[in-house]
Amino acid sequence: MICLKVASDLLIFRHKPRVFAVSPNTSAAAWAVACLIMLVSISLTFVVVSLTLGMPLAMAREWHAVQGDIVRVETALPGEHASLRCFGKSWPVKAGATGHWIGWIGVDLGQKPGDYTLHWTSKTRKASGRLHVKRGHFRISRITVKKEMAVFDARALARIHADHASLRKAYGMYVNAKPDISIVRKPLNGIVSTPFGARRYVNGEPRSPHTGLDIAAPEGTPIVNPLAGRVLLVKSMFLNGNTVVIGYGLGLVMVYSHLKSLHVHEGTWLKTGATIGEVGRTGRATGPHLHWGVRFNGARVNPDSLPVRVGGRKKQGT
């Protein structure tokens, strides 16, 4: 009742804040105590008014990421539904414990470094947070290939453009699944020959940044599905070689390229651990390897930022 009376006084401008009388001879410690009491009084008053008016009290939280990261965020909001927005688009969320929500945000490889606001909304409350994006430090990668795989004639360019169109279409396909944004295992164990984000030079000429991981392994090594999903695209491409694209739901899509051969079919639901194909060197490749790319809600993200589940729990990918 006392709290409500104070709130009522504030709302009709009748509350008179307590004045702390401090003489000129008061010590510095006394001054500090007086200031602290005033701050606590103001804070408690704000809480009382907020509770009385039904205003949200969710505190802003902060997260840090580099270009290409997948960021797991969370908040406490009442209600059966919640949404999350950042970078001008919506991101998937899942309910945790009562009143607790978990979301995932993909930071595109080309996202400008800076501070961004993320917005949580439920039916009755709102909350916000800050995402600090730092510039990634990406190495330089140089490869040498045959001239026809670096300088393209009209026929090759037409095929490359058609391949890109097929990929874009696959990235936007809906898959009816709602997984956690994580994987059970990596598709292949091997040596990372070209990391995510590498600045590419082909025959000495600059090319687009590398948007996946190149994992070198002996030709014919099985490549396994890291998470249950639907095959969206199976195609032999000019640069990517034999390529399979699998959608996992909630905007998570993975690309597997340079396969030795194609065995899966579009529309098939592949279980976790099922064989996607074998390591090959088709397309523009200097040796047998898997190009593993990940798109999350359209963002080009680092496969190594996907958490890997270990013993039923999740461990950040390495």
Image: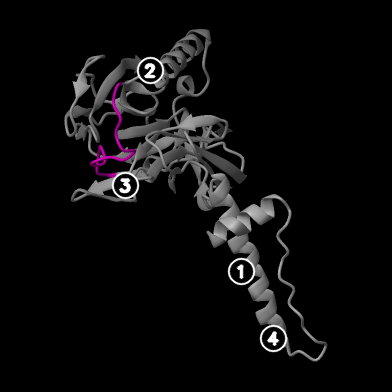
Q: Tally the marks.
A: 4
**Colour treatment of the image:** one colour
Which residue in the structure is indicated by mark 3? 97
Q: Is residue 151 magenta?
A: no
Q: Residues within 10 Å of mark 2 (few under 14, many from 20)?
A: few
Circle 1 residue: 40
In the image, 33: left or right of 85?
A: right
Within 10 angstroms of label 1, few (less than 14), some, or many (20 or more) residues? few
Q: Which residue is mark 4?
A: 30
Q: Amino acid at mark 3?
A: Ala
In terms of secondary structure, where does tag 2 sit?
A: loop
User: Which residue appears at 55% of the width and 62% of the height?
Assistant: 2
Secondary structure under the numbered disc 1 in the rendered image = helix
Label 3 sits on a secondary structure element that is: loop
Which of the two marks, 3 or 4, is nearer to us in this view? 4
Which residue is label 2 attached to? Answer: 173
